[in-house]
Image: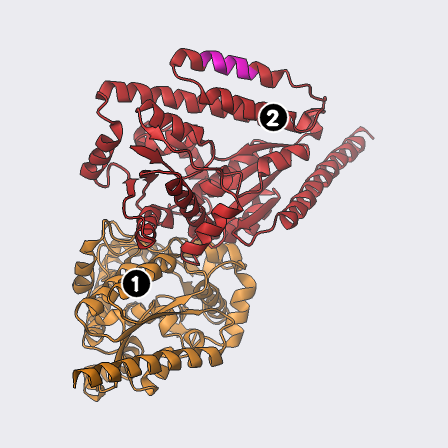
Chain colours: A red, B orange
Amino acid sequence: MRISFPYMGSTIVYKKLFEFLGHEVIMPPKPTQKTMDLGVKYSPEFACIPLKMVMGSYIEAINMGAEVLVTSGGHGPCRAGFYGDTHKLILKNLGYDNVELIILDAPQDNWKAFLQNINKLRNRLPWFKVINRVITLYKFIQKLDELEKLSQKIRPYEIQKGQTTKVWNEILNRFDKIKTKKELENTYLECKRMLEEIPIKKVNENEKIRIGIVGEIYVVMESSINFGIEELLGNLGVEVERALYLSEWVRDNLVPWSLRPKRFKDLIKKGQKYIKILIGGHAVETVGHIIDYKERGFDGIIHLMPFACLPELVTQSLIPKISKEEDIPILSLPIDEQTGKANTQTRIEAFIDLLKNRKKGIKKQLDKNERVVVA
Amino acid sequence: MKIGIPQALLYYYYLPFWERLFTELGFEVYESGLTTKDILDNGSKAAVADICAPIKIYTGHVIDCLNNSDFVFIPRFSSIQKNEYFCPKFMGLPDIIVGTVENSEKKIISPIINDISEDICDPRSYDILIDKFGFSYRELNNALKKANKVFTRFKKLLHNGLSLDKALFSYKQNFWEEYLYSIKKNGEINIAVLGYVYNLYDPFISLDVVKKLEELNVNIFTFEMVNHDDAYKQLSKYRKKLFWTFSNRVLGAGLYYLNNNIIDGMIHVTAFGCGPDAIVGKFLQYECDERSIPFTTLRIDEHTGEGHLVTRIEAFTDMIKRKKAQTLEVKL
């Protein structure tokens, strides 16, 4: 089976998954303007941007020869759980009849369908091997995420601009070639050294600006749609942390509720201060992350959402209140096919200036207070 | 004590229930009235820019209620059917209002509706009324039962072919079933006008599209005329149902009308920025295409002008009338 999948974040992970299971993988190209145009053309006008981009990605992958598309389902109330069926309908009407779309819903919704789908995907491998390889893959994602987090701490202070990004691309290349557990360990250590060897300038701890990125998973993780916001912020000298990393998402969402780490449950509890019940998507988590970042001493939050995203609109409605009550600046950016890069860049630069001034202001105030105390 | 019910969103469906419930409990009920330009403007100013028009209107009505009553009733609709939900904006509705309308938090009465049927009379959902006003469980239960009786009678009117605005009228004027006899369906063509109640029956936002179509000699079929089970039976052809109850009802009703050859055309009325409708609309469109039934979408928002709407529905009905006349000629 020639398999392909939606393009989101570190796609080499999905590629590795299907390679481990012995499939031929058609790697969808990184989304470009062409992908977006294709997606926008064939999707419902008021669908959110992830649906449109994935639509475009599918068409590109099919034209490259993909026969099977694998995607996730969901049980609502966010629209994302119905993407698969909508895509299927549109593809059928475009005349791609020979393409199969495998939608993996949560197992507890429909055990039978889930097992059937997994059976199709496992490619006659014995179950113990499948489980073994999935565990290896999980470690693979974890290591990759650790390196990414490290790179985000180094990029803002690099002396030669662009070096971290170069090293990061090299890391992705090397990870792509990994075949066994042993190789993973070695490559990880090598890559870590490569990152640590990047020359950086010293910045005082109290002058560092740190921003947390929260919001809907697709626009947060996929750099081609969010103007490469992490790189953009890094190049402006800002440390970044995303609210969502793939390994954490897997841990928080695919592991049964009772076994999930306490950290995740705490996040939900924090979020429920403002949104009382779970309303689908990432809304409650987003609020939880905002409060969490504030408690961890971050200077500001950037909130990314697709235009007209149902759950995130609830978050957005609450942002002025949260910002005021928790005393943290928040910039909310809705993203769709109309969003321009220059406009966003200006807004982000202004936001960072604000954060810097705010930090200086707080520091000055503290100095003043000290003097008063001394006097 | 005066309790305000914003005349927007599910007001149009549940008014008989809520009104009876609160009068039974001894409240004075305040309704914010029809949407006006002022209400819309206040709502748009307070709400987030990107949110859909119905929520903006709702926000405006809430502001009106806050000014004119002691409390405002903003139920949090989570589910009225097993394994189905409402649009996330309904589930977070009180949170949205608290975030956007200042000083509203203490005045909001917000039960969480988490029921298994659209008769939302499970007393456990209304704990907040017991906590806040000290009603006994028995008082509450009795009031809910009476409210449900009214609501059931009201729904019967709908299933007998009254559109919701007429049913509400007959409820308010206390005509009830007598009003049914005054309704005759003798228009030239049959059109399904599908959309959520708060879009179709708010005359300010829909510009009274239902009435305008009737003036064009059209028989109207809406989703609330198809009863729940008939609508859901149609959905079995899909791999899974939609997540949103009213979207399922709209889609199911559309399929019901199509499969039973009742209609000559379909109009999908949707609000700017409506998420579930982006998917429902696409499904309806393809189903109509398959059967060569004319289909059009009317998208309404706070800027909709009357002129273009009239032109569009006139063109649409003319086209269907001509098509129907032609097929008749061929048959003769």
Q: Does residue A186 show up magenta in the picture?
A: yes
Q: Chain of mark 2?
A: A
- What amino acid type is highlighted by mark number 2? Lys
The residue identified by callout 2 is A166
- Residue A326 lies, with reference to residue B283, above or below; the image says above
Q: Residues within 10 Å of mark 2 (few under 14, many from 20)?
A: few
Q: Nearer the viewer, residue B246 or A174?
A: A174
* Secondary structure mostly taken by the magenta-highlighted segment of the chain: helix
- At a point 20% along the width and 39% down the height, the residue shown is A113
| On-image quarter of the C terminus of chain B | bottom left
Task: Give the quarter of the image for residue A368.
Answer: top right
Task: Give the quarter of the image for residue A5.
Answer: top left
Q: Nearer the viewer, residue A17 or A1?
A: A1
Q: Which residues are magenta?
A: A185-192
> What SS does tag 1 mark?
helix
**Can I make out residue A153 in this image?**
no
| On-image quarter of the N terminus of chain B | bottom left
The residue identified by callout 1 is B284
> What SS does tag 2 mark?
helix
- What amino acid type is highlighted by mark number 1? Leu
From the viewer's perspective, tell me whether residue A75 is left or right of residue A233: left
- Residue A203 lies, with reference to residue B14, above or below; the image says above
